[in-house]
């Protein structure tokens, strides 16, 4: 039976060898059962309460492909400690015909899911309660109960018992000077956005060395986040202001504000950076802002409760100048977030969202899979993958020859024994040959690799499917699944503003492109074992970014002009990258 092994440890304090230990024990169990272990999936220093683990998600993808029959792990809590997540994993794997077997519990059934899942959930709650109790004691002693704030340094020293002392902080004088500047400028009437821009312009690194953002300064007044709301700067340590709960739909932690009577307050005057007068001025200005009629009107809408519907390019746009993301700067306009908010990027132009979407849809439909380019890709990909399969075929031939030779030697020894031969090393030689033949048989049990075959009319099938999706995008009833399917074809979109106009660079995932053309979905990888490949299409447009086919010229990588009917393609093979690169110049 085909099996995979999953291993995990949750704490940074644990050793990476913990993974190796789990894998070794699981491999020994698989050998005893005669199971063929194909792959090992692992997650290091990730909590079992978190389902968004790369190793676990890869395991689920492989299970969905039908390539495995057993998931072998040390214990059920290695897969998850959350009761609901354990039940979900069990249902998903059972649906795909995959058994869960653990060293601790054996084959997992519904009974294990119920009882063990409940025990793991209780363990998490008990661990959280003990952790909080220990943190509260540290805070009441004037020590830090968590991460470090800007303006302070972690004190590293050994205590009288020879163990590291944790939770001690000291003031960082350079950062403290920056903090006083921020507080003073805000109290004088400057906005957090303007303060962040000046700090970036002066080359002052922000928290953790990143660029300054207005949100890091502003924060949330009621929740005590943001530099100008951190009471530690006036020598008051506040703990347990917020609690965190996991959203059952997304698996992400969401903060909730605790009642003030649950907060723990400790005076730490030695950590004061801001004096009372400056702190009072800042709080007074915040009060004036809250009392502004425009601010009141905005808050009355409770805009934070309205979840925005994702657009075609939500989260996919990148600035071609700085590499940062795009953000909304109006009802239907998008621009570089770093340029507008931080002033750290020179590409300040805004673009109509609908125009960008039209260009990207045109590129996805017409340019990502040019017929000649796809033919070249199919040929290059087939050669590379089949070369690997040829090597595997040669390896199997060597193993088969070695097995035949070992079998002949073993038969010769059997005949010698039948003739009465008895020597001290004969038994060891027999066992050695038998063990080697068993190892070879296990290796040869893997199916012979088949040659890769991609349909030559792939590009036409792809274009037809994307055209259908474009039509479905206009229908409200089918818009959401069509939107997700098209988004699955796109890795990122870069927008470049140049002297000649605007260039749009689209990067897609070749696995998703081919998967859609072959009747699969754009969001799931192919079951044929294709590696992820990248496709880049570079298109430039002036004015309103409309694509006018009759006025388009394509420029190949060599710089030679071609007409629209030609297929100027530059393909780079190597390091698992295949790129289609087009440069379009549109004159409107």
Image (cartoon, rainbow, N blue to C red):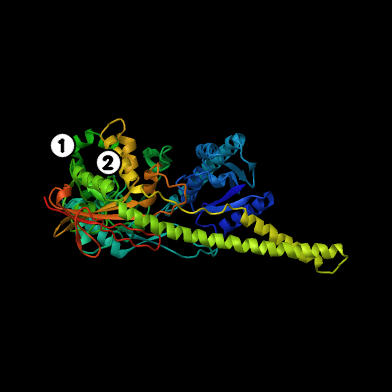
- Report the front residue among 557 and 489: 557
Image quadrant where residue 19 sits: bottom right
Check if mark 1's residue and mark 2's residue have beta carbons within 8 Å: no
Q: Callout 2 environment at 10 Å: few (<14), some (14 to 19), or many (20+)? A: some
Q: Is residue 25 left or right of residue 309?
A: right
- Report the front residue among 154 and 431: 431
- Rendered position, 382 above or below 333: below
Q: Is residue 199 left or right of residue 7?
A: left
Q: Position of residue 85 (x, y in %)?
A: 50, 39
Kindly identify which numbered label has been placed on residue 311.
2
Kindly identify which numbered label has been placed on residue 166.
none
Spatial CA span between label 1 and label 2: 32 Å
Q: Residue at x 81, y 69 (%)?
A: 425
Q: Is residue 54 left or right of residue 291?
A: right
Q: What is the residue that sits farthest to the right in this orientation?
A: 420
Could you tell me which secondary element the residue under label 2 belongs to? Answer: loop
Q: Is residue 489 visible?
A: yes
Kindly identify which numbered label has been placed on residue 293.
1
Q: Residue at x 28, y 31 (%)?
A: 476
Image quadrant where residue 520 sits: top left
Q: What is the residue that sits farthest to the left in this orientation?
A: 588
Q: Is residue 184 visible?
A: no
Could you tell me which secondary element the residue under label 1 belongs to? Answer: helix
């Amino acid at each position: 039976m085909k099996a995979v092994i999953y291993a995990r440890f949750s704490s940074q304090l644990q050793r990476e060898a913990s993974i190796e230990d789990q894998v070794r024990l699981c491999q020994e169990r698989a050998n005893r059962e005669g199971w063929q272990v194909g792959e090992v999936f692992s997650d290091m220093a990730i909590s079992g309460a978190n389902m968004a683990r790369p190793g676990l998600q890869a395991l689920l993808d492989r299970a969905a492909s039908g390539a495995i029959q057993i998931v072998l792990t040390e214990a059920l809590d290695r897969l998850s400690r959350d009761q609901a997540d354990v039940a979900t994993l069990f249902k998903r794997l059972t649906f795909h015909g995959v058994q869960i077997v653990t060293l601790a519990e054996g084959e997992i059934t519904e009974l294990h899911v119920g009882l063990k899942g409940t025990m793991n959930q209780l363990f998490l709650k008990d661990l959280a309660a003990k952790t909080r109790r220990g943190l509260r004691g540290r805070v009441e002693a004037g020590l830090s109960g968590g991460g470090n704030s800007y303006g302070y340094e972690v004190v590293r020293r050994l205590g009288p018992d020879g163990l590291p002392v944790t939770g001690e902080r000291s003031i960082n004088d350079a950062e403290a000077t920056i903090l006083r500047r921020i507080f003073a400028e805000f109290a004088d009437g400057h906005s957090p956005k303007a303060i962040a821009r000046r700090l970036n312009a002066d080359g002052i690194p922000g928290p953790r060395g990143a660029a300054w953002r207005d949100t890091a300064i502003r924060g949330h007044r009621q929740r005590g986040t943001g530099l100008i709301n951190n009471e530690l700067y006036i020598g008051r340590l506040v703990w347990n202001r917020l609690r965190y709960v996991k959203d059952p739909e997304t698996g992400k932690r969401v903060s909730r504000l605790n009642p003030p009577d649950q907060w723990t307050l400790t005076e730490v005057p030695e950590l004061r950076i801001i004096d009372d007068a400056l702190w009072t001025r800042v709080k007074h200005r915040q009060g004036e802002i809250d009392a502004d009629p425009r601010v009141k009107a905005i808050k009355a809408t409770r805009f934070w409760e309205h979840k925005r519907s994702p657009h075609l390019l939500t989260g996919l746009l990148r600035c071609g100048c700085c590499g940062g993301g795009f953000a909304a700067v109006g009802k239907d306009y998008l621009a570089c977030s770093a340029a507008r908010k931080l002033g750290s990027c020179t590409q300040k132009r805004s673009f109509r969202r609908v125009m960008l979407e039209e260009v990207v849809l045109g590129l996805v439909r017409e340019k990502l899979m040019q017929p000649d380019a796809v033919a070249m890709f199919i040929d290059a990909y087939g050669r590379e993958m089949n070369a690997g399969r040829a090597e595997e075929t040669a390896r199997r031939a060597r193993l088969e020859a070695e097995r035949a030779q070992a079998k002949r030697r073993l038969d010769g020894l059997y005949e010698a024994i039948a003739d009465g031969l008895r020597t001290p090393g004969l038994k060891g030689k027999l066992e050695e040959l038998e063990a080697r033949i068993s190892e070879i048989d296990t290796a040869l049990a893997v199916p012979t690799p088949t040659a890769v075959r991609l349909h030559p009319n792939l590009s036409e099938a792809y274009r037809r499917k994307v055209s259908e999706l474009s039509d479905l995008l206009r229908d409200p009833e089918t818009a959401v699944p069509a939107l997700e399917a098209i988004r699955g074809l796109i890795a990122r979109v870069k927008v470049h503003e140049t002297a000649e106009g605007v260039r749009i660079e689209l990067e897609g995932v070749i696995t998703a492109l081919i998967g859609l053309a072959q009747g699969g979905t754009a969001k799931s990888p192919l079951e044929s074992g294709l590696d992820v490949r990248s496709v880049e299409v570079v298109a430039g447009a002036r004015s309103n970014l409309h694509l006018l086919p009759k006025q388009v010229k394509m420029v190949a990588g060599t710089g030679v002009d071609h007409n629209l009917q030609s297929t100027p393609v530059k393909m780079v093979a190597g390091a698992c990258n295949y790129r289609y690169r087009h440069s379009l110049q549109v004159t409107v």
